[in-house]
Amino acid sequence: MRIRLRRRAVRLRRALSAGATLILLIPVCACRVELTPPGAPTPWPAASARHWQWQWQLTGPVDPDVDADVFLLDAARTTSAETAELRARDRRLVCQVHVASVRSDDPDADRFPESVQGAAGRRPQSRWLDVRRWDALEPALADRFRLCRGKGFGAVALADADAYLYRSGFPLGFDDQLHFNRRLAALARHLDLSPGLMNDVPQLAALAPDFDFAVNEECVRLDQCEKLLPFVDAGKPVFHVEYTGSTEEFCVVTVGYGFASIRKQPALDAWRDPCVTRGYPDG
């Protein structure tokens, strides 16, 4: 009889101990912040499209304390430790990838045959690429996208996606670039990245269905802001920057359009002067 009582007591203590452990674990699980896993495409809820605050930094140490929801960073320079810290703060991360140019010091420069490299590009020591040669470009560009995904980015912004507007050394037309950019958007989605279009203003309306967001430089100075409205009308964010003027001057226009606007130095270091959305329509 005593043995049975002892066994029951042991089982009771074990049950109570397990129950106490479960009770202690419940609040921990309930309070844990659920982060999007690395490589999952970044969501852009339409209801938030007019309310994002963003940062664009390509030089200097990444400042994680910047009060921004979205960080646009260089894919190669940014470390996994930096992206991990930003993700722990629930920031949305976008990597910038040059898709139609290559620099001589790029780690993958030797993967682009000489036959697809044309005239000098916008960046120092860079050359334009022949965007008609998808067969030659796709393997290296896919690996550039995979680098973003591997470092924990959930979105990619396509830089130099407007080679047809420049003297690239190739007879590129509007349709050549359009076809190339759509292929890139599809490639990004295939690799679980949300695609964003950088500049390429003449094709914004045609490409709005293919991309999730737009990044624009100086639409106020260039008098091009109205051409970004197809993204706004589709409930997609427009991340806009000016390098001259003051926020008091251009924010009235761009925030009224529904853009997320900031002023930056051309060096694109950590400094920024953001537009505030409070007081504007839908802000």
Image: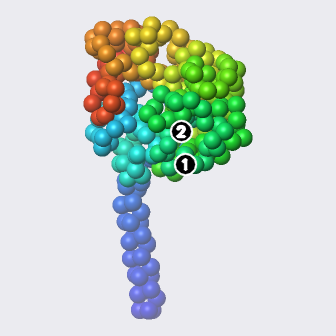
Residue type for callout 1: Asp
Q: Is residue 75 above or below residue 267?
A: below
Res 181 seen here: yes
Q: Which residue is tagged 2?
A: 102
Q: Is residue 269 left or right of residue 126?
A: left
Residue type for callout 2: Val
Q: Is residue 7 above or below residue 148?
A: below
Q: Is residue 12 left or right of residue 248?
A: right
Q: Are marks 1 and 2 in contact (CB under 8 Å)?
A: yes
Disc 2 secondary structure class:
strand
Residue ID at (65%, 26%): 170
Q: Quadrant of the C terminus?
A: top left
Residue in front for this viewpoint, 154 or 121: 121
- Which is more N-terminal, label 2 or label 1? 2
Residue ID at (34%, 31%): 268
Res 190 seen here: no
Q: Position of residue 47 (x, y in %)?
A: 49, 23
Disc 1 secondary structure class:
loop
Q: Position of residue 22 (x, y in %)?
A: 41, 63
Q: Position of residue 279 (x, y in %)?
A: 32, 11
Task: Give residue 108's mark.
Answer: 1
Number of numbered markers: 2
Q: Is residue 66 above or below residue 6?
A: above
